[in-house]
Amino acid sequence: QVQLVESGGGLVQAGGSLRLSCAASGSIFSLGATGWSRQAPGKQRELVAYITEGGSTNYGDSVKGRFTISSDNAKNTVYLQMNSLQPEDTAVYYCNAGNYFRFRYYPNYWGQGTQVTVSS
């Protein structure tokens, strides 16, 4: 069983930066991929970014060029560096992990989420 715990959320002004961390209790990197999703009030959850076991990354169009996902296998931790934050980035951010098959990511495990609020 994999457990994921997010940290690093908070309140930041527009244009600022935050780094989210996701610590896993089990070995998540053998699953295939790990990622981050977010859900804003009244909106559907969207996949923000993921990184595969081989190190390939993929980003949602709304965060390309601003967010960077990375992983530290030794620490069993995944990070999301978020730069140039905008009010529309305000959401609960969820860490996830799952299978990667035929160039698609299938999250199976989810953290509890961490709130990110960007003020204008």
Image: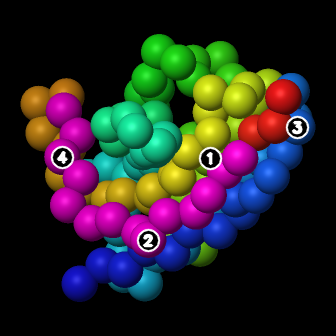
Front-most of 71 and 54?
71
Percent coordinates x, y for residue 20 in the rendering = 66, 56
Crowdedness of circle 3 by 10 Å Cα count: few (<14), some, many (20+)? Answer: some
Crowdedness of circle 1 by 10 Å Cα count: few (<14), some, many (20+)? Answer: many
Image mark count: 4
Q: Nearer the viewer, mark 3 or mark 4?
A: 3
Q: Secondary structure at mark 2?
A: loop
Q: Amino acid at mark 4?
A: Tyr
Q: Nearer the viewer, mark 1 or mark 3?
A: 3
**Figure check: 76 above or below 10:** below
Q: Where, quadrant-wise, is the N terminus in this rendering? A: bottom left
Q: Nearer the viewer, mark 4 or mark 2?
A: 2
Whole-angstrom CA distance, mark 3 to mark 4, is: 33 Å
Q: Label 3 belongs to which residue?
A: 13
Please give the label number shown on residue 80: 1
Please give the label number shown on residue 106: 4
Percent coordinates x, y for residue 113 in the rendering = 49, 64
Q: Label 2 belongs to which residue?
A: 112
Q: Amino acid at mark 2?
A: Gln
Magenta region includes residue 78: no
Q: Residue at x 44, y 71 (%)?
A: 112
Q: Do we see residue 3 in this rendering?
A: yes
Crowdedness of circle 2 by 10 Å Cα count: few (<14), some, many (20+)? Answer: some
2 or 1: tag closer to the N-terminus = 1
Whole-angstrom CA distance, mark 1 to mark 3, is: 18 Å
1 or 3: tag closer to the N-terminus = 3
Q: Nearer the viewer, mark 2 or mark 1?
A: 2
4 or 2: tag closer to the N-terminus = 4
Residue that sits furthest to the front in the current view: 42
